[in-house]
Amino acid sequence: MIADRAHDRAVVGIGNQPFMSIQAVGKTYRGKERSVKALDPVNLDLAAGEFVSVVGPSGCGKSTLIMLVAGLVPMTTGQVVIEGRRVMSPYTNVGIIFQRDALLDWRTVLDNVLLQIDIRRLRRSRYEPLARELLTRVGLGGFETYHPWELSGGMRQRVALCRALIHDPSLLLMDEPFGALDALTRDQMILDLERIWLENRKTIMFITHSISEAIFLSDRIVVMSPRPGRIASEIRVSLPRPRRLSVRESTAFGRYAAQIREQFQAFGLLTET
Amino acid sequence: MPEQSDREGLGRGAFTARLASYAYPLGAALALFGAWEAFVRIGAISPLLLPAPTEVLATVVREFPVLLHMSAITAAEFVLGFALSVLVGLPLGALIVYARPIELAIYPLLVAFQTMPKAAIAPIFVVWLGAGMNSKILIAFTIAFFPIVIDTAIGLRSAAPETIHLVRSMGASAFQVFWYVRFPNALPSIFGGLKVASTLAVVGAIVGEFVSADKGLGYLVLVANGELNTRLVFACVLMLSVLGIIFYFLVEAIERLVVSWHVSARQLELAGETG
């Protein structure tokens, strides 16, 4: 299988050094009257080119985990090592996508993608053709001069995806990127994301609360417990790629879904009478 | 593309909406002045108490040279006062957001100063700066700068945390965060403050002229009032409101140019869509 082969190559390529290593990373928010433990120490390794999803209930600290990994919020315990270097300040070899697209209203679609280039002080003229090509690849050719408010939610999130890819980062951090989209748009985005990922194999850490989204996209799924979040189980997904939407009706898919659901039931998050 | 035709549809709607935006206020103003004129004529009100709008207009035409001269002086006072309040207000608003100690130190003082009635301290400025234009500029400034400071601070603080996180992950410096995100994001709020300030600056200039002056529209109002020349008082008031309106719409025109992307600037299009 394509995915498995790529996987082996990636792991062997760096001599068993993981691309990213999350080591006992925990977060406690200290308040005046009480401290809130958002994340119990988490250990997780990601191989280069691996697609790992983190699923868990709302408030389990999975968004916090993304912020810690990106070096945007200081961690209380532990460390994150990416490509052999400890993350001490905002990690910049990364593309981040949030649930809210965070597009700038005053910039056109093209300029929103090129924000990445402007802030990095790279040559605009070099990256502009690339930005146009990316936009065309996600079906936004012809919309370069539009402003964000003229686009639908799905189109806006595609612009955010292009902005996260334009500088060719080795890591993508995605925090419930499709959470605000309707079911149909979501399915299309999932297909597009897998296609784009198969083309250039970036390492992706994908946060979601959708079990089916996680199974469809991932090489590996990490299930987190309710707050304070910790890793409850890991599931390796070995469905052939590229995956088709119909894979969701397969028995293998159902087995993975049942496994995660049972985990949630064990937490008492789902009760059936 | 269907989106393309949507755009043109909005364009046509926007035209009718724009037409309505002129027709409605004009109609309302005409109705008001019509009622006023009728009230004065039917009730045979003495022009000493309330001159008819047509008489006021006639006075404006008759006294136009002197009115224009006085207007130029008053306009210079409130425009300079406004400019000064922008020059001080914007950096002060930014300072409040970026320097916590400054916020702690200055903010209560600002609020205390704002609650002071400026008309009460205006005479002091005249003592300090003389009866010339400088004291009027300073009074216009003290009245106008507060909303600019507050709205600048509010605007700079209103950037979404995700957006800040995002640009920091691109390696943005503090200045880049300000320049690419916080400042443009604050512009609609800043212009809100500027528009309020533009009307307050006019009030400030007149307050200053009331206290002590030998020229300007406020001075002319006092003189005309002393002579029981009510027509001229009303003519001055008319000139003042025209000046105020021109200044306000000037600021608004700049706003439209600068923040054409903002929701408020798109309201016209929305009105076209529903209407």
Image (cartoon, rainbow, N blue to C red):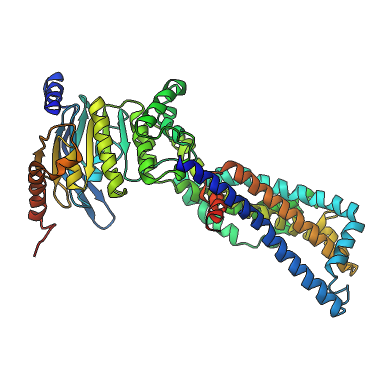
Q: Position of residue B23 (x, y in %)?
A: 69, 59
Q: Quadrant of the C terminus of chain B?
A: bottom right
Residue A90 visible from this viewpoint: no
Q: Is residue A5 above or below residue B83?
A: above
Q: Where, by quadrant of the figure, is residue B171 drawn?
A: top left
Residue drawn at (70%, 66%) of the image: B28
Q: Position of residue B271 (x, y in %)?
A: 55, 56
| A233 left or right, relative to B123 | left
Q: Position of residue B269 (x, y in %)?
A: 55, 51
Residue B158 visible from this viewpoint: yes
Q: Position of residue A96 (x, y in %)?
A: 31, 36
| B90 left or right, relative to A173 | right
Q: Nearer the viewer, residue B258 or A210?
A: A210
| A136 left or right, relative to B146 | left
Q: Nearer the viewer, residue B15 or A96?
A: B15
Q: Where, by quadrant of the figure, is residue A134 drawn?
A: top left
Q: Is residue B216 above or below residue A81?
A: below
Q: Nearer the viewer, residue A58 or A235?
A: A235
